[in-house]
Image (cartoon, coloured by chain):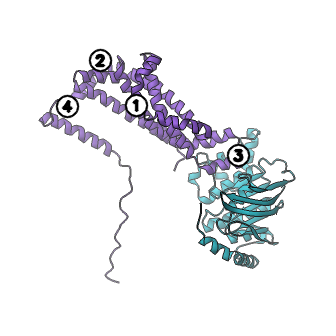
Chain colours: A cyan, B purple
């Protein structure tokens, strides 16, 4: 299933957040969206996922989600959004309980996604007992459980420390390599973008417009830390963004 | 470098910690002080009764079986009235938290009812429900209803919106979101509201019993007060205090059990 964004414009009151965004999201690729803070990256993701409605333009699904897909557009949130009163297994189970399936199938799906995210031993742990990285793994397991057509990742690693971030990034790459998923990955971290993105969309500061789209051909499995080609891409992205980021930093907030 | 001084520690205090037994010690010291004062004579026996006499009165009340004669009607009134008021309060509070029209319509009404001293309405309830138990149930129910409503819709408002958005993003049904996300998220706030509601319920129970009841802690205190029998009056007051402490401890135990997930 592909997604197409057509001339998306969005405002909060008088403030234009996004202006005339048109973008194709082809199946099986990860599209990274980067931009200075406050440029509307997260808003764009919520528009794609149907959590907000654009003022103008539309988001179209092309084709049907694959068979067995329970929730085509599935989010992974920056702050994990786990229910603190449910254990790891319960948090994954939550998103399956509204779908008609027998207890055995549900159990099997939970076992499978917990194994894929290396959480099998933590099934009965409560979120407060887990580190940030583990919490985000649970959120990723929960997203995998509904077999999404498109994963919408909203700064999924931004709340984690640098070491955990690197570990989780490797996990994401491994997950994608094993079973390629379509992803929209919003981040302000250029290193994450060049590691995970097949295409990188650079947004300008508010109101967000597409400044540039960069394609990186290198297979995800070959991209490791400090890869020279990636560093070149990263330097180029930083040059694109530098002035925008500085200007965004100087802006007064009108919220 | 040889004349180094240690860095002074400045991070002391502003960190309340649980100290076991201090509360009990304050209570015991206070009682002993009164006992000493009444025996030594610097507290007149019309100012305060002697604690040992209050205890003797209480023991006698127990042995004569009169304790249960007064306590059981009071407890059943508190239970029935409180259950009615709290159940309705939680229900209405959740509806106010979930629906904008209900909120717009009922919040001003609740704000109007809240400050009315409910005891002033007892004559009205006696006309509506009769002089018997029903009017006392109604009084306690109304008294516990309003604080429960306010606490409940506040608790629903404070449920983490990102969790609700998460539920929506996974396509959970409305009822699932309410049952599995909103209600458990509001539970801490609802339970802490219950402490206030139950305390108000006890106050109204006594007030209702003072205005028209043969048996009940309130009636017992009223009779004692009419005779200036300070020992019996204080024995009644102590029973109420114990009741308050016990209900608070009960809610605390429920909190520890159902809110284990909290940090």
Residue drawn at 43 percent across, 33 percent down = B198
Q: Are marks 4 and 1 on the same chain?
A: yes
Mark earlier in primary sequence (4, 1): 4
Residues at marks 4 and 3 on the same chain = no
Whichever of labels 2 and 4 marks the residue nearer the N terminus, that label is: 4
In the image, are marks 1 and 3 on the same chain? no
The kind of secondary structure element at disc 1 is loop
Residues A50 and A67: in front is: A50
Distance, label 2 to label 1, CA atoms, is 36 Å
Real-space CA distance between mark 4 and mark 3, rounded to the nearest whole angstrom: 64 Å
Residue B117 image label: 1
A96 vs A254, left or right, is right
Q: Is residue B142 left or right of residue A190?
A: left
How busy is the neighbourhood of tag 2: few (under 14 within 10 Å), some, or many (20 plus)?
few
Mark 4 element type:
loop
Task: Give x and y (percent) for residue B204.
Answer: 39, 28
Q: Chain of mark 2?
A: B
Image quarter where the N terminus of chain A lies is bottom right
SS type, badge 3 = loop
Residue at 38%, 49% in the rendered image:
B18
Residue on which the image places disc 3:
A95
From the image, tell me which residue sits under label 4. Answer: B50
Residue, disc 2? B64
């Amino acid at each position: 299933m592909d997604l197409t964004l057509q001339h998306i414009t969005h405002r909060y009151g008088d403030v234009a957040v996004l202006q005339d965004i048109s973008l194709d999201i082809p199946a099986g690729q990860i599209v990274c969206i980067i931009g200075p803070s406050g440029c509307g990256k997260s808003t764009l993701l919520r528009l794609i996922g149907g959590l907000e409605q654009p003022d103008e333009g539309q988001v179209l699904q092309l084709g049907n989600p694959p068979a067995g897909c329970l929730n085509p557009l599935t989010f992974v949130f920056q702050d994990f959004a786990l229910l603190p009163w449910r254990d790891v297994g319960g948090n994954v189970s939550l998103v399956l309980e509204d779908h008609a399936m027998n207890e055995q199938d549900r159990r099997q799906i939970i076992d499978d996604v917990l194994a894929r995210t290396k959480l099998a031993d933590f099934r009965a742990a409560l979120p407060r007992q887990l580190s940030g990285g583990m919490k985000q793994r649970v959120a990723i397991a929960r997203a995998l459980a509904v077999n999404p057509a498109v994963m919408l990742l909203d700064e999924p690693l931004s709340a984690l420390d640098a070491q955990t971030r690197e570990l989780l990034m490797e996990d994401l790459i491994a997950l994608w390599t094993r079973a390629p998923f379509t992803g929209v990955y919003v981040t302000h971290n250029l290193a994450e973008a060049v590691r995970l993105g097949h295409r990188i969309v650079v947004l300008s500061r508010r109101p967000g417009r597409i400044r540039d789209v960069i394609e990186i051909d290198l297979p995800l499995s070959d991209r490791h830390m400090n890869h020279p080609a990636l560093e070149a891409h990263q330097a180029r992205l930083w040059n694109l963004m530098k002035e925008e980021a500085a200007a965004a930093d100087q802006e007064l907030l009108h919220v | 470098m040889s004349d180094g001084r240690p860095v002074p520690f400045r991070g002391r205090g502003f960190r309340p910690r649980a100290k076991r037994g201090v509360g009990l010690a304050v209570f015991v010291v206070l009682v002993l002080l009164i006992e000493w004062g009444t025996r030594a004579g610097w507290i007149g026996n019309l100012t305060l009764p002697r604690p040992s006499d209050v205890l003797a009165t209480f023991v006698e009340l127990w042995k004569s079986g009169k304790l249960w004669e007064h306590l059981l009607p009071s407890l059943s009134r508190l239970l029935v009235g409180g259950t009615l008021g709290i159940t309705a309060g939680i229900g209405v509070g959740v509806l106010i938290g979930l629906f904008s029209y209900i909120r717009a319509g009922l919040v001003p009404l609740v704000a109007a009812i809240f400050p009315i001293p409910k005891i002033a309405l007892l004559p009205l309830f006696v006309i509506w429900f009769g002089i018997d138990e029903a009017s006392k149930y109604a009084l306690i129910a109304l008294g516990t209803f309003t604080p429960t409503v306010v606490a409940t819709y506040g608790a629903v408002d404070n449920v983490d919106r990102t969790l609700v958005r998460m539920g929506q993003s996974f396509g959970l049904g409305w009822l699932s979101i309410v049952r599995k996300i909103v209600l458990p998220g509001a539970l801490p706030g609802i339970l802490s509201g219950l402490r206030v509601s139950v305390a108000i319920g006890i106050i109204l129970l006594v007030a209702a019993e003072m205005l028209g009841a043969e048996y009940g802690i309130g009636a017992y205190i009223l009779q004692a007060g009419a005779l200036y029998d300070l020992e019996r009056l204080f024995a009644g007051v102590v029973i109420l205090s114990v009741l308050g402490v016990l209900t608070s401890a009960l809610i605390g135990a429920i909190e520890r059990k159902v809110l284990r997930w909290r940090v």
